[in-house]
Image: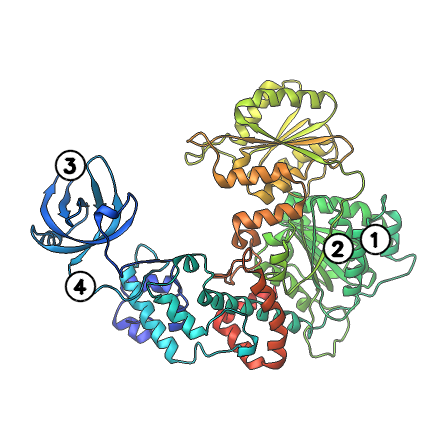
């Protein structure tokens, strides 16, 4: 069976079959790919059962005699057969069948059947069971069921995996890379583990197979976690060999940093002071900083970024700040211009603004400022990394809400320094990169920080600035909307402002949700004396800006919005957040939205408005999310629960775009294996570099390059 990558010549001679194309689409090209394509579950075809001992829903294999077989037309054409095993009878139904199926089920034939047994008024039935002649030798091992697609039948896939596994085991693809003395306890050999997991004997504990606690599974998970730790540590060490601009900490009273610190209308918290110190030390080194700054909503990450930018500018270099949306970029621009512009202008420096919606004349002027170095700080969206943007001397790149950017986008921003010319001759042969500071308002759970973010230095702002008001979170059924509107009325009469967030812009047949436009119209009718604005992503940028400006200035009482206001918007006078159809939102997104209120001195609340599903209840996942929101306001606890509910794939967003998620290990249950891998990785790189390289290549191949972003 052709499972290796075919040559161009062979592809021309013989077109690929549908299953072969499906194999390629799933990435099952090499023997090692097939060998590592492990079963989802197993079926026991090693023994026979009896109808009399079975229960509704059982997957049963039994032998019986065909008593009748005919094609009927109730309710549509189907082949219907009745069989008996001597203890009971069962009706077989086939809606898709060929003439040879009728022959296989001729009256009087002894057959072996396997399928899901359904009990009912008319006795047992099986839909489309597998049929073979009775007396065929039973399987010697459990039958694996592999992840597949509709175009790839299990029988074809099993044969392909069996062939790939045999060839991989005969080669050195699975040669041991971990010395026996370094293996974690209760694990098997690698080859032994693979053979076992593809063909486990019938007496194995199904519980250990299903929860992946069996020693064979433990070995595969240990291998995978070690590959991840090795690639992360290798990427971190390679970065230590690169050059970066030395952005020394200035102590000059007339310097940008000193003046900014003097102008700030508030004192930094202890946590902010700690992370500012960490970042300042990194920037003063000739090695590229690669730091993640994490902190809960409203913890004061922006001012930390401003101080880092000021240190960069003091050293004679440019700083770029990239945000995922124009609204968030504008918020940063407004704050940083307010803090830095009075300090930069006497020096002949400015803050530039780059977005995709700019008119050509304005954009060209900004590009010229960036290229000349007059723009000491450049703030914008993805427009900052476009080809036409040329920095004179980019020393620091700051990426806000970093998980919203893909790997290629982060790499593009870092590579902007290669186009820059600071007027200095760099004699060192190592390439130069800007320092990189990534910020996230979604705290990273400890297990993720140990695994997917192990290549980063992580700074955490773990306290909120004084004056932040705790937000009370309430659950409210959609049927009580009128009560909610009355509560809003009292808040508005007291001079407060309200957010009302909707999940969709326009009606969808699949999701019966109230859209932002309808909600806006309903609230306008209910509150005729209040200015109520509407904001969504499809509005022209100028209109968005005008609406946001009215709300920020306090002239607008209610802002009906989609999730474009999720991060960055800062309106201290807003004291009530209503999230409509809260059951449709993710946990971290709900927490981000809640963080838009409680930013002033007034008591604030977040109302999670939920609608019951078609069966009159919330799904288990939705109930878990809403319960977490009510029980805690701690972003780190929210992040931990979010990881439990969603798993790392969705939680990470685009950070690992292009690199495989953990396929076998589970960060919630395999923390001890993760600690083992974390301790062994530096030992492997230092003492067994060749083995370490083979180990990474086996599991990640070229995908480890994505960790450099």
Using residue 502 as the reference point, say whether residue 378 is left or right of it.
right
Residue in the image at 59% along x and 47% along y = 641
Which residue corresponds to mark 2? 377
Which residue corresponds to mark 1? 344
Residue in the image at 63% along x and 79% along y = 686
Say if mark 4 contacts mark 1, CB within 8 Å. Answer: no
Q: In the rendered view, would you say 481 is above or below 152? A: above
Say if mark 3 contacts mark 2, CB within 8 Å. Answer: no
Towards the viewer: 153 or 521 = 153
Asked whether residue 503 is in view, the answer is no
Say if mark 1 contacts mark 2, CB within 8 Å. Answer: yes
Indicate which disc residue 136 carries: 4
Which residue corresponds to mark 3? 74
Secondary structure beneath disc 3?
loop
Asked whether residue 544 is in view, the answer is yes
Q: In the rendered view, would you say 29 is above or below 608? A: below
**Few, some or many residues within 10 Å of mark 2 (<14, 14–19, 20+):** many
Mark 4 or mark 1, which is nearer to you? 4
State the separation of the CA atoms marked 1 and 3. Answer: 83 Å
Towards the viewer: 303 or 64 = 64
Residue 691 pos. (x, y %):
54, 79
**Few, some or many residues within 10 Å of mark 1 (<14, 14–19, 20+):** many
């Amino acid at each position: 069976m052709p499972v290796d990558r075919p040559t161009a010549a062979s592809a021309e001679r013989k077109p690929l079959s549908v299953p072969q194309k499906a194999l390629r689409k799933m990435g099952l090209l090499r023997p090692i790919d097939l060998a590592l394509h492990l079963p989802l579950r197993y079926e026991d075809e090693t023994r026979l059962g009896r109808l009399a001992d079975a229960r509704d829903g059982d997957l049963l294999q039994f032998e019986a005699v065909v008593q009748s077989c005919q094609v009927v037309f109730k309710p549509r054409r189907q082949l219907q057969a009745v069989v008996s095993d001597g203890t009971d009878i069962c009706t077989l139904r086939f809606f898709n069948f060929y003439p040879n199926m009728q022959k296989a089920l001729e009256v009087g034939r002894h057959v072996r059947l396997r399928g899901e047994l359904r009990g009912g008024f008319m006795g047992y039935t099986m839909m489309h069971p597998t049929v073979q002649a009775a007396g065929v030798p039973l399987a010697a091992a459990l039958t694996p069921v592999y992840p597949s697609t509709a175009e790839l039948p299990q029988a074809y896939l099993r044969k392909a995996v069996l062939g790939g596994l045999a060839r991989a085991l005969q080669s050195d693809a699975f040669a041991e890379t971990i010395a026996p003395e370094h293996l974690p306890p209760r694990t098997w050999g690698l080859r032994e583990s693979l053979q076992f997991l593809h063909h486990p004997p019938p007496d194995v504990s199904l519980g250990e197979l299903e929860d992946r606690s069996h020693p064979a599974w433990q070995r595969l998970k240990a291998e995978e976690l070690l590959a991840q730790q090795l690639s992360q540590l290798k990427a971190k060490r390679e970065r230590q060999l690169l050059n970066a601009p030395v952005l020394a900490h200035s102590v000059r009273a007339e310097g940008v940093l000193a003046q900014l610190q003097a102008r700030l209308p508030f004192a930094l918290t202890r946590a902010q002071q700690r992370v500012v110190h960490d970042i300042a030390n990194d920037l003063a080194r000739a090695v590229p900083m690669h730091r993640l700054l994490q902190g809960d909503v409203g913890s004061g990450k922006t001012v930390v970024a401003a101080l880092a930018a000021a240190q960069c500018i003091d050293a004679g270099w440019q700083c770029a700040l990239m945000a995922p949306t124009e609204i968030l970029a504008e918020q940063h621009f407004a704050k940083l211009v307010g803090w830095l512009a009075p300090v930069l202008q006497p020096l002949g420096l400015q803050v530039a603004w780059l977005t995709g919606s700019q008119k050509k004349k304005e954009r060209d002027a900004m590009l010229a400022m960036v290229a000349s170095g007059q723009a000491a700080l450049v703030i914008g969206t993805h427009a900052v990394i476009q080809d036409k943007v040329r920095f004179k001397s980019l020393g620091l790149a700051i990426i806000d809400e970093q998980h919203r950017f893909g790997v290629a986008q982060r790499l593009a921003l870092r590579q902007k320094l290669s186009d820059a010319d600071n007027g200095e001759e760099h004699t060192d042969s190592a390439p130069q990169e800007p320092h990189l500071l990534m910020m996230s308002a979604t705290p990273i759970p400890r297990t993720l920080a140990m695994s997917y973010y192990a290549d980063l230095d992580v700074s955490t702002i773990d306290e909120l600035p004084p004056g932040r008001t705790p937000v009370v979170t309430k659950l409210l059924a959609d049927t009580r909307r009128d009560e909610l509107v009355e509560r809003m009325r009292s808040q508005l009469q007291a001079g407060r402002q309200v957010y009302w967030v909707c999940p969709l812009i326009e009606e969808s047949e699949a999701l019966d949700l109230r859209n932002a436009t309808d909600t806006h119209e309903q609230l306008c009718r209910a509150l005729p004396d209040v200015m109520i604005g509407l904001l969504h992503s499809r509005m022209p940028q100028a209109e968005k800006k005008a609406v946001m400006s009215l709300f920020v200035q306090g002239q607008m009482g209610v802002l009906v919005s989609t999730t474009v206001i999720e991060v960055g918007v800062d309106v201290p006078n807003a004291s009530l957040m209503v999230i409509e159809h809260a059951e449709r939102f993710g946990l971290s997104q709900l927490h981000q939205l809640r963080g838009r209120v409680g930013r002033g001195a007034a008591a604030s609340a977040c109302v999670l408005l939920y609608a019951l599903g078609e069966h009159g209840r919330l799904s288990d996942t939705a109930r878990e999310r809403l319960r977490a929101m009510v029980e805690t306001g701690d972003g780190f606890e929210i992040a931990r629960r979010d990881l439990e509910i969603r798993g790392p794939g969705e939680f990470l967003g685009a950070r690992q775009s292009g690199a495989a998620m953990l396929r076998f290990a589970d960060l919630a249950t395999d923390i001890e294996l993760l600690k083992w891998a974390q301790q062994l990785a530096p030992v492997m790189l230092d003492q067994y570099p060749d083995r370490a390289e083979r180990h990474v290549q086996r599991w990640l191949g070229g995908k480890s390059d994505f960790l450099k972003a």
